[in-house]
Image: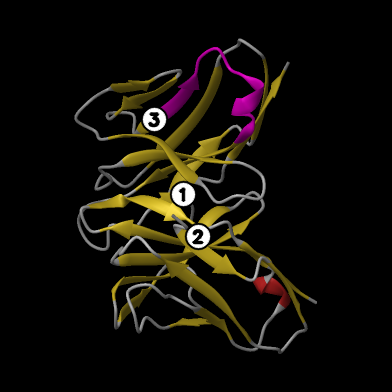
Amino acid sequence: NAGVTQTPKFRILKIGQSMTLQCTQDMNHNYMYWYRQDPGMGLKLIYYSVGAGITDKGEVPNGYNVSRSTTEDFPLRLELAAPSQTSVYFCASSSPFRREKLFFGSGTQLSVL
Amino acid sequence: QQQVKQSPQSLIVQKGGISIINCAYENTAFDYFPWYQQFPGKGPALLIAIRPDVSEKKEGRFTISFNKSAKQFSLHIMDSQPGDSATYFCAASSQTGANNLFFGTGTRLTVIP
């Protein structure tokens, strides 16, 4: 019963590098989300998806891209990493029957130096 | 712009005391108000939630009080325990539109034995 799994847990990037944060869930949830958490700022929604093949922007989408080819996976792509993208990233999912109850992964701590 | 404002930023309470965290919102379309609890190194987890048709909801030692006219809601933790030490986030969403959650900035609670 894994729930939402994120990899990697930690990563250090140099400015201008690219990487993909992986997220997979085994609860057959239609809805998936990417949040970033910065100290004193709470969680901000980056992108979300309501099902395979459908994605949409959240509050802070600039500098990120997503894709949703399967129900289980929702990777987040950082292109041309910048110091402002240093943050803790959380993936979450929810059921269409109770969309407001989010299940979160344990996070990816990313530093861009 | 912070859609949900949360205070205090940090809170220290003695074991057995009452912890109170407050949140306020402006968007009258919000109709779901959850509280999430986050332990260090973990993702947030849903603790308790309320809809605006009731003024209070209690689950064990945790109570949400909701004031629709003032657009405020609060979390009360009775008989606070050291195991309650965590960061607490209030949030709000609207069932119309994208129905995404907007989080407060978080309150770091420390319960002293």
Q: Quadrant of residue B40?
A: top right
Residue beneath label 3, please? Answer: B73
Residue beneath label 1, please? Answer: B103
Q: Is residue B113 magenta?
A: no
Q: Say what secondary structure mark 3 lies in.
A: strand
Residue type marked 1: Phe
Q: How many marks?
A: 3
**In the image shown, does A63 or B70 lie closer to the viewer?**
A63
Quadrant of the image containing the C terminus of chain A: bottom right
- The label number, if any, that marks residue A62 in the structure image: none
- Look at the numbered discs 2 and 1 and tell me whether their residues touch, using CB distance below 8 Å: yes
Q: Position of residue A111 (x, y in %)?
A: 74, 70
Residue depicted at x 27% and y 28%: B69
Q: Quadrant of residue B10?
A: top right
In this picture, which residue range is highlighted in magenta? Answer: B74-86
Q: Position of residue B50 (x, y in %)?
A: 30, 33
Q: Is residue B49 left or right of residue B77?
A: left
Residue type marked 2: Lys
Specify few, some or many for label 3: CA neighbours under 10 Å numbering under 14, 14-19, or 20 or more.
many
- The label number, if any, that marks residue A44 in the structure image: 2
Residue type marked 3: Phe
* Callouts 1 and 3 on one subunit: yes
Q: Quadrant of residue A99?
A: bottom left
Q: Residue furthest right?
A: A113
